[in-house]
Structures are given as C-alpha cells and as structure tokens.
C-alpha cells in the first residue's frame, strides 16, 4: 500500500512512509465500516482490528519489497506487488487473530471468520488501495516530468533569446562606433573649437 513508481524507483523517507501508513489506516477504517454495514464478521471492533492488521501488514510488506528490489522491470514489479500483497494479507490475518485471542485453528475452521475469507477480502481491498497509491504516484510523477519539460523549454527559450540579444548587440556596437566617428569627423570639418572642448 506504499506509494511507488511503476519501476520501483522511489526515495523512502519517513514523511512519505508515515503519510502512507496514515492513509492506509484511514482506508482500513472505511473498509471495517463497510464490512460492518454488510453484516460481515462479529461487529465493528473485530472488523476494525482485522482490517488494520491486514492493511498495515500489506503496506509494510510492499515497502519491504521495494527495499529489496532495486530498479525492477514492469514484470518484476508486478510479481513483487502480488507476492507482498498476499504475504501481507496472510501475516495480517494471523496478527489480527493473535490480537483478538483467537486460535489459529479457529480461523482455519471459519469461527468467526475463515482465513480464506480474510485473505480474499484483504487481497481485494489491498489491490484497490495499492492501485490508488500507484495512481497517485503516477500523477505526481507526470507532474514532475511536465515541470521538468517546462523548465527545459524555458531554458531553451532563454538561451535562444540570449543568443539573439548578443547578435543584436554585435550589430549595434559597430553602428554606434561608426556614428561616433562620423560625428567627430563632422565636428572636425565644421567647428574645430567645439572639437577641442570635447
């Protein structure tokens, strides 16, 4: 659930990490409310704990995957997301059961919820949230690329303008020199006293 670029090139910093966890926790709360409204599970508290455990485990798993996989291809990135999503859902399900004091045998037998239901729901919602972060990162990356392109275009225009100004300056300087010399010659011919004062 951690935001990432399509090729996995991202700078991991604390601010982005905690922002991602906070957004993931918010999504998890909405998912718990949604499941409770659908009368799934044994009430909001259990749905909330499982939702938070699964969602945050998926987020952490994806983050860890990005740490180990540097500059992946698109296929490697997809496989990494698939593996970390599944792993996070499994770990989160067991963590939720542990926090609630359920026996691991109980979640395999479906009391109060089955492991396969938890995994299915976790992977479904995890995929949606991962896609959300992926889209957000793509939009941010597009904005950065557009800004870089704009800066390049402005630099190019500035360079062209500077070249044009230098060309005009090169044309104007001899013209002023010629006019100045012409004025001196005219003064020499017409009024030698004024020329002596200059």
Image (cartoon, helix red, strand yellow):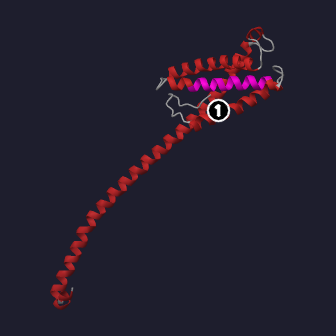
Q: Identify the residue at horizontal 26%, vertical 64% (top origin).
A: 171
Residue 198 vs residue 95, the one in the foreground: 95
Residue 130 coordinates in the image, percent (x, y): 62, 27
Task: Find residue 192 and report its image quarter.
Answer: bottom left
In this rendering, is residue 50 above or below 172?
above
Q: Is residue 108 left or right of residue 188?
A: right
In this rendering, is residue 184 above or below 74?
below
Q: Identify the residue at horizontal 79%, vertical 22% (top origin).
A: 46
Residue ranking furthest to the bottom: 193
Residue 195 vs residue 49, the one in the foreground: 49
Callout 1: 10 Å neighbours few (<14), some, many (20+)?
some
Residue 162 vs residue 16, the one in the foreground: 16
Is 54 contained in the magenta span?
yes
Task: Find residue 115 and report its image quarter.
Answer: top right
- Report the span colored magenta: 46-63
Q: Return the residue at label 1.
A: 21
């Amino acid at each position: 659930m951690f935001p990432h670029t399509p090729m996995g090139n991202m700078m991991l910093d604390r601010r982005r990490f905690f922002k991602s966890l906070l957004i993931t926790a918010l999504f998890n709360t909405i998912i718990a409310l949604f499941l409770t409204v659908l009368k799934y599970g044994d009430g909001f508290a259990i749905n909330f704990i499982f939702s938070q455990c699964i969602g945050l485990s998926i987020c952490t798993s994806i983050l860890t995957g990005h740490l180990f996989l540097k500059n992946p291809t698109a296929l490697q990135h997809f496989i990494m997301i698939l593996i970390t999503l599944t792993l996070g859902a499994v770990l989160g399900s067991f963590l939720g059961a542990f926090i609630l004091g359920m026996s691991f045998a109980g979640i395999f037998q479906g009391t109060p919820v089955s492991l396969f239901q938890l995994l299915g729901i976790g992977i479904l919602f995890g995929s949606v949230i991962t896609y959300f972060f992926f889209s957000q990162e793509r939009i941010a990356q597009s904005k950065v690329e557009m800004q870089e392109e704009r800066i390049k275009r402005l630099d190019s225009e500035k360079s062209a303008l500077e070249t044009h100004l230098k060309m005009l300056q090169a044309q104007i300087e001899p013209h002023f020199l010629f006019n100045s010399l012409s004025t001196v010659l005219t003064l020499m011919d017409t009024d030698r006293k004024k020329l002596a004062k200059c």
